[in-house]
Amino acid sequence: MRIVDLRREPTRAGARVAARVLWEESGRPPLDVWWEVEGAAAADLAASSDAVLAAAFLPAASSGERRVALEGPVCPRLAEGLLTIARVFDGWRGTSSEPPRIEAREGFCAAFPRRPPRAAVFLTGGVDSTHLLRRNRADFPRDHPESFTDALAVFGLYAPDQLDPAEPFAGYARTRAVLEETAAESGLALVSVATNVTALAPEIEFIAKRSLSSVLASAAHLFPSRWSSATLASGRDVTILVPLGTHPLIDAALGSAAVAVRHEGIGISRPDRIAELCAAGGAVSRLLVCMSGPPPPLLNCGRCEKCLRTMTALAAFGRLEEAREFPALDLARTVGAFDFGPHYAPYWRDLLPLLRGRRDDLAGAVERRLAVAARQARWFEDAGWKGLLRRADRRLLGGRLLAIRRAVARAT
Amino acid sequence: MKIGAIRRTGTAGEDTIEARVEWEDAGRPPFDLHFSFLSGDVPAADPNAFLIAVFVAALRDGERRIAVEGAICPVLRDGLRAAAAVLGSWYGGDRRMPALEPSEGFRAGYPPAAGGEAIFLSGGLDSLDLLLSRGAGLPREHPAAVRRAIFVTRCGLFPDEPQLAETGARSERAVRATAAEAGLPLTVVSTNLLGLQGSLRSFALESHGSFFAAIAQLLSGRVSTVALAASDDVMSGLHPWGSHPLLDPLFGTSAVRFVHDGIGIKREEKAARVGGSEPGRRHLYTCSFPLPGDPLLNCGRCEKCLRTMVELLVAGALAESETFPRDVTADAIRSLPGVPSYRRLDYYWEPMASGARRAGRPDLADAIDERLEANRRAEEWERDRGWTGLLRRLDRRWLGGRALAFRRRIARGAR
């Protein structure tokens, strides 16, 4: 892969950094990637090779590119970190791959971090980043180098092909407005970045399991004169960590000598985070957790697993009515009919202690769904006497027993 | 548990920070924990350091609270909560997070404005590789540049053991020379902390990272980050261990971040980088059992020496080494000593057989395979695995071990 024509150009409302990505091994057509910023922060936007490298490295690795060649200088710490990340993924997947070589025509050169230090936080408006912001405000005096001064919101990650290059923020006006409020309430400036860089590897699974943090980090590396660190809120607590595109083992390796990247919050479970937000007051009113992009006027659909789980937790604390971006619905009935499956069962199980004695109707609904999830898990695992029968049927009868049962069920 | 009476004492050239640790639930006697700097510099009287130092022991031994004299960093507060969860998920047991009760509340410390990093040096392969890689390409005045090295000379376990004294002396000699040649001031630390932890096994499995992190906090105000070399890499598989990339950073504060560095580098790559470097050629020290009369820095007989020698040989660097014998024999590998029960011989040695073949030493590769096969058989025997293990279990259960006794009698008779 070659990354050429890295440039910064003014736009009507701010500035844009763009580069052309040329694939060398995978036979894909060239791709123009860009990041756009509006408002005052645009003055700090830099055409950073580190930013493009952070975003392009993992797609290059997964596409079998043998090198990533850049025209500008690259931070040696970031280059080392990216190789580490490639190996972390290898370790997780049990594979042994040769990561792409990083070639920098102007060499490897460590930039100095800005002085005095300033810290940014990635803000999505969800439980994790809102909680992290609250914690930061409570724990650090404003003059502390780790006290957040900017909130960084990145748009376009999951639908890069739907971004209009002429109006990249057009679809995000409501979300931006809510995030502006959340940031302003904590005295932060919101820096919004729209990018199509996930078009390098646009599959949702790749973003979720591989590239999420690297794409976010690329946005952080565009502002070395504005902040010296950027912090990601952990989406999970340490007891339920799984290999994902954001993880404490990889996020810290995405930093450069000028902009450190941090992953914070793994000591606190999601129910505890929600409990703290509910206790803080006000914070729950603007929560944005939904990934499904519901039609206006609300920003949370109230139907997906994440929405329902968050609503249930808020209901446990009697704060659901304040969460203005969620729809009003009969929550116990909706949860009682919702199939969250075995994968999400641990998260729902965590909610039971919060619900019992406060919302026994919801606790009952969650318990019933957990029982269904447990049955599904046993089915998936071929556990119990039915599993034994299924295994025996497959092994000894070639699955004929199951086929007969299904034929009978269809006939009746 | 209470941590109090944090005080500074000292004599010329040896500055000490002490605190009294009193157990409340575990029924253990009070412990005067100290950290001494033997290098003329002064340790910070930082309560965070003492909290980190005692935390794993307090957690393991069921203390319900840790009351500390002074203020504690909120970053550490959250980190310890996560560390308790990590250790609980690895080792189970009744590890409940003790309540943290600092007398002056939770307050974030400030890193020094000029930044600066320190690294732990032991003289071994991992830490020398860290010296060569961490901050590579960074100018010395960069805030992320390594500006200091730390060496722990005594740790409080088996203080009268002459073997450890010899190991410590050789290690210190190697590290002093390495740091001096790298232009890094060296902080030499002595502590009795391992006396509080209890055992080498607990140190290895649970508290190894927090031990070094506690010492790192004593440099608060002088450096903003302290790095510890990873001993395992992610490709070979990370497993529960007292120093771990998930665990170590949790023992940092906002004043001194604690970093576990090097999980992306394979041991063979470290051997190549270190073996080909001047400090590696002249000062690499890995030996566990040196004898006073040994002519070279490393004995060349113990498991760790032999392992490092094969790694250097594969990297083409053993013949240039000034600290190891310059060749390895197949016989030495066949009679390789074992490793402690909490480590696995095959974890280290299995990847080396193919390396030895690549390096044109099939004799060593065969010897490694033989030694690993013997080790596997011994492990199977210990764990009653395989069909012979099944027979032994049945014999114990149904025949009270009579079949084994009979077999031994016959074997004795035959001899």
Image (cartoon, coloured by chain):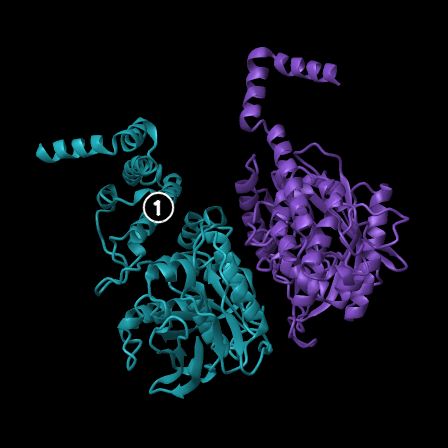
Q: Is residue B259 visible?
A: no
The residue at 59%/20% (across/down) is: B392
What is the x, y in percent for residue B402?
63, 12
Residue behind mark 1: A344
| Position in image of residue A385 (x %, y %) | 31, 26
Host chain of mark 1 = A
Amino acid carrying label 1: it is Tyr
Left or right of B14? Residue A300 is left
x and y percent of residue B275 in the render? 72, 62
* Residue closer to the observer: B391 or A50: B391
Dividing the picture into quarters, in which one does residue A18 lie?
Answer: bottom left
- Up the image or down, A256 lies above or below B364; here it is below
Chain for colour purple = B
| A175 w.r.t. B343: above or below | below
Q: Nearer the viewer, residue B238 or A261?
A: B238
Query: Front-most of A29 and A255?
Result: A29
Residue A411 higher or lower than A121, as above or below: above
Image quadrant in which the C terminus of chain B is located: top right
- Specify the colour of chain A: cyan
Q: Check the image and name the residue furthest to the left.
A: A411
